Each structure stands twice: as structure tokens, then as C-alpha cells.
Amino acid sequence: MRVTLLDGRDPTTAAGTNPTAAPRPARRMVQVLSLLRSPSGSRYVLLIAVLLLTGTFAGQLVHNQFFGDSWTGTQKRCASEAQRRYPVPQTKTERDAELWIQQNQWRIRCAWPAARRLMTVSLTGSAGVLVLGGAGLWLLPGRALRQAGPLSPAPARAQEWADQASQDLRSPSRPRVVQAAEGWEKPFTAGSPGAPVVVLPAAFATLEPGRAEAIIRHEVAHVAAGDVRLVWLTRSALGAAMAVLAAPPVSLALQARREGTALREVLANSFWGDYAGRCLLLLALVFTASQLVLRSREHEADILSVTDRSRTGLTAVLTAADRTERITAGAQRWWIAPSGPRSLLSNHPRPCRRLAVLQLPRPHLRPTWQDAAVIGLFGAVTLDLVGQLAQAGFPGTFLAPYVTLAPAFVAGVLIALAWGVQVWQGAWHDRGAPPVPLRALAALAAGTAVGFLARLGNTGSLLSVSSSPTWNSVAVVAPAVCVAATLSAVLARSCVRASSVTGRHRRRPKSLFIAAVIVNVSLFVGALRAAQELALYTYVLPQDRWSWLTLDGIHSPHSSSDAVAVVLLALLALGWNVRRDAAAGTGSTTASAWRLALPFVGAPATAAGTLAARWVSRDAQVREGLNATLQYDSMAAAAAGLMCLLALCSVRGSAGLGPALWAAPLATVLTTGALWTVRARSLAPQGFTVAEFFADPLAQLAVLGSLVVLPLALLPARRPAPAARILVPCLGAYVAALLTAGLVRTDVFLYHFSL
């Protein structure tokens, strides 16, 4: 097992070597960007963020112990004073709604000092994890370093290999190579920041030169990737989180002792048993996930060490290790065998698994269901903890409008880096693999659900369907994350195929990472933000089932930003699909040309069917007024895009998702443009703008389309038959007309205008 170390003292002094020069400051930003481009490096960041955020809940409990009565009194006083200043009668008039808004705003401003104190004490818990984790970053590695001592200078050729590897891998610092004492068998990397040292076992001199150089290059690859600091920062942060989470019961015990209360009576409350169980479960999951991330980093170090070099030396080392493992496995009991339960706690993958990755034509890490489960779990925990901070500190400030956006942004960015980037890199290397890894999607949803069920905010509450909004979050947020992941995989496949056809597949373009970040951040942040609001609506308005679909669409305050995201993704998908099909169809068969032209024909056809049905029923909402007419226009335009999506996938299966991502918004835009031409004269005095009129249908299309993405992704991909040239436009137009005719004969979407 490799032990990576960071010690406060300079271990090269004990080895008789010269200190390593500090890294150039210009390389630090490059190293940070390299870390974020690595999927496992992004998981390190996500893991550390979860550990830091767990301290906020401990801080909230400490606040409630010492300031709970004061906080409750302030809330009651402000609520009664707000009711006295702005009394709201029981009637439901527009004036009453304004009074209620003023009353709520005054109550928030009145209670802001108490809310600020709550947020400050909560952040103190995160600060405690950070401080203790930083201290552990210097203290913990010393023990392992002393176990390997006394250190001695390594052979000169070992230092030459390390210098050459540092130059090849563009490491920000050149590590010194030293040798451990007799009896130490495993190499590891240690050193203070900017002065890494590779510690080799005493038997290193007996190895063949090829194997010895491969071992050194592997360790230098860890230095180049920044693993040394991350490993010990994660371990020290885990220990610090355990200490901070223990602070609330310890402070309660000390307070009870000072007041003369029996400790057994204080801790007998079921709340503390639930709290202890959730803390242990969360820490156990974090530890297991950290070992999984460590194993992924070993694979990346293997891949980095053999970049543009022969794999013979490292393959020989791993083959020998695999042979030794197979020999010793027969004499071990099943629970400590390499393939037994103990393997879950190992920070090294098995040699056979490392060999399998190296034997790929283009070695890379494929997204696995274990990785997906970990990312979903930590994403849900991050979303919950950041949401608690936002609800405590944002009201009454200029950040109040971002209470739901802030947690969605933080969690969405972390998930996009940890999951989306790896999916795009996997699509680049495995062009023949299926675009959507189904097992990984299921694990992503399961991990998200477990993260919500095990979150610390539920401590002391029963998870019944009627009393807790947790089940609403599980039922809405988990599928939303899967929808975003599915669309990410579809867009990744479109991007890669476009690059392959145009001859840009020999080397991965630098723009792939930028495109992956833009697409995945847009998808995951938007999905999490919309899913949070939808989960709240389903909990607050359980009887208004159809209203859920419109509250996140045409009635959403974020419809403009949602429309911008839809247009951005549609333009990217359009560019990639057109470039691929145009290049593949140049001088080719008629089928390739029709595959390119089919979405262009289907989108206007569905728009025409919708407009025809809307024109026939143009007088259906006259009695309801202008607002009802505009609402039905938006729903009809969104229905046109939805029918275009379904029509394309009906003839091409899951392969139709790629072109449908731009054809469906095109159908919605065409329908909306025609309706705007008709309504422009009557809307001008009302102050409506073109952007507002186009935003609502696109936002509603995003909601309706997300309901069918997962079932469509499960369909088998197939080539469009010749009959599809007629089937797609006719089917799209006919079904769109039927759906529009049905929409205009129901008043379910008018519910919100009566509030």
C-alpha cells in the first residue's frame, strides 16, 4: 500500500540531500486547472467540500443550545409586530397580497440580526473543520514518515529518473529521491509543500532498471497531479469533521454537568441517538468514498506515468504484483482476501484492474456505478447543507433572490466537474460505447436519494410521506439529476462524433474541457434549481397536480434564464449535429442527407400543426382575458417542441435525442414567432417584450421535455427508415394539433391567475 505524506519538517535533511527549490508561482494556477480537469481530482474537491459543510450543522446545534431561546423569542416578537403593522384580512384581494408581502419583508428585516448570528455560528463549525484539517495536514504525516526512517540517499540513477520524469510530466517541483530503512517495503511520496520527496524501499536497488524507473515515474506522477496534499488534506479533514460533529453533545454534557443535571437524562433524548447514527453513517460513507477516490487517482497516476512512453516497465511491475497476490490469496481468509470485503477499504486498486486499464488502446478511466453513487450522495449532501446556510443568512440581504440558486449552483458545479467531465472524456476515448451508461445513471439516482434520506437536517424527524418534504426531494431531485446526466451523455456523443468526422480526433482538443464544463454546469445547475422548486411545490400544493408543471415553466421567475440555457444547448447541439451529418453526407448516399434534413422538416411541421389547432380555437379564451390567451399560447408552443421531440425519437429511438435537442426548441421558437406576429399589436400597450414572450414557452419546454428524456434514452438506437421522411412531419403535425386542441379546452392552467 502506498502511503502519501506531507510533513512539516524537511525530510531531506535527515537523508543528507539538498532541499528542493520552491515551485514557480506561475505553475500554481496550471496545477489547479489540471486538478479540476481530472474527474477524480474534482471528486477530491467535492469530498472536502462535504466535510467542511458538515461543520455547519454542528454549528447550528451549538447555536441552538446557547442562543435557541433568544432566537425563538426574536422570531415571535418580529412576527407579532409585523402582524400589527401590516394586518392581513382573510379575503384574497390584490391589496391583501401586497400587505402580506410587506408583512413578510418587515418580519425578515426585524429578525435579521438573529439570523446573522445563526449563520455566523454555523460557519464557525466549518471554520473549525478547516483549521483542524489544516493542522492535521502538517501533523498526521509525521507518524508514517518516522516509521520509514532513518532515511538515506538513494542511488544516483534514481534521482536522474525522477528529474527526467518531472520534466516529462511538467511537474511544478522536482522531488528528491531517498531510501527508507530496512524492512520498509512500499514506496511513498512525502515532503513539505513545494519540497516533495520520493521514499523508496530498501530493496529498490535489486530491481531491474525498467521496473525501478516505472515505480519512480508513478510516484512522480502523483507529485505532478497534486495528490500528496489532497490525500492528507482529505484524511485530516475527515478527522476534523469527526471532532467538530462531536462538539454539540460534548458541550451539552458539560452544560448539564455545570447545572447538576444527570448526563443520562440529557442524552436519553431520541434526537441524540438519531444524530449519532446519521453522523456515523455519513462519516462511514465519506471514508469509503475517499478510498474509492484514492483508487481512481492510482489509475490516473498509472496513465500519466506512461504518457508518450512504453508501458513495459509498469506492466511488468503490476504483473509480478498480480502473480504474488494470486499466490498469497489462497492462504488468506475470505474476509481479508484481495477480492473480499476488505478490498472496499483499500486505497489501491487490484493489480489486475490496473493492468486492464493500461491495456486499453487509449488508457482512461471509464465512469463506473460506484463513482456515480458517490457523486450523487455528496451532491445531495452539498445541496442540503448549502441550502440550510442560504435559508439562514440570505433573507433580508441582497442575496435573498438566490436562496434556491446558491445551493443549486454550488452542488451543480461540483457534480458537473466530478461526473460530467469524466463522461465527456469517456465518450472521447470510447466512441463505440453506448452514449448513456444505464448502471451509472441508476447509481447516480440511488446515491442522490440516499444523500437526501441520510442528511443531517432530518435529525429528530420521522421520514413519513405526510410529515416530511424529504420524500418529495427524493422523488423529484434524483430523477432530475439523471435527466441532466442523460442529456450530458447525449451532447458528449454529438460533440465527439462531430470532431471525429471532421478529422479532429487524433488528439483531444483543448476546447473539449471548456465545452464539457459549460454544458454540464448549465444542465446540472438548472436541473437542481428547478427540481428544488418543484419539490417544494409538490409538498406545499399536493392537491394541484397539474400546477406543478407550470410553476416551474411559464410561471417560473427564472423562465428567462431557463430559456437562455435551452437556446445555448440547442445551438451547441445544432452545430455538432450539422457539422457531423454534413461532413458524413458530402458526396454520400441520400440516407445521410435525409438524416440531416429530417429535423429541419419535422420542426416546421409540428409548428404548423400547433398553429392550425390554435387558429381553429382562437376564440376559446376570449372570455378569460388576455392573460389566459397568452398562457395557452405558451403551452401550445411548448407542446409543439415536445411533439417534435417525440416524433424524431419514434423513428430513430434514442439516436433521435441528439437532433431533437435542437429541433424541439426550433419548433417552439417557430410557433412562438408566428403567435407573436398575431399578438404584437395587442401586446404593445401592455408592455410585453419579445424576449418575455419567447422565454416562457422555452422554459415550459424544458420542464415537459425532462419528463420524457429518460424513457426515450432507454429506447434502442436505429437508423431512420425511408418512410420516416413522411412519417416524422405528418406524425408531429397531427399529434401536435391534437395536443393543442386538448389544451385549449381545459382551464387547469388558469388556476394560478385566480390566486
Image (cartoon, rainbow, N blue to C red):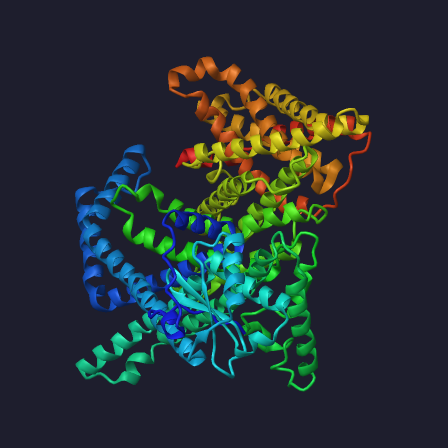
Q: Residue 145 at what x, y percent from top left? A: 41, 75
Going 69% across and 37% down the picture, which residue do you hit? 656
- Let me know if residue 744 appears in the view: no
Q: Quadrant of the C terminus?
A: top left
Of the pair 595 and 162, the residue shown nearer to us: 162
Q: Position of residue 659 (x, y in %)?
A: 66, 33
Q: How many marks?
A: 0
The vertical placement of 734 against 705, above or below, is above
Report the side of 581 relative to 6 (left or right): right
Q: Decide: is 519 above or below 175.
A: above
Q: Residue at x 67, y 73 (%)?
A: 320
Q: Give the vertical position of 216 relative to 486 (above or below).
A: below
Viewport quadrant of the N terminus? bottom right
* Most distant residue in the top direction: 681
Q: Residue furthest front?
A: 156
- Position of residue 417 in the picture relative to residue 370 (left or right): left
737 vs 67, nearest the viewer: 67
Asked whether residue 145 appears in the rendered view, the answer is: yes
Q: Is residue 59 left or right of residue 114?
A: right
Q: Residue at x 57, y 67 (%)?
A: 215
Looking at this view, is 573 or 398 the one in front? 573
Percent across and percent down for residue 546 are 53, 41
The correct choice, above or below, for 108 with respect to 723 in the image is below
Q: Tell which of 251 and 46 is nearer to you.
A: 46
What percent of the width, then of the height, locates residue 625?
45, 23
Location of residue 242 by image quarter:
bottom left
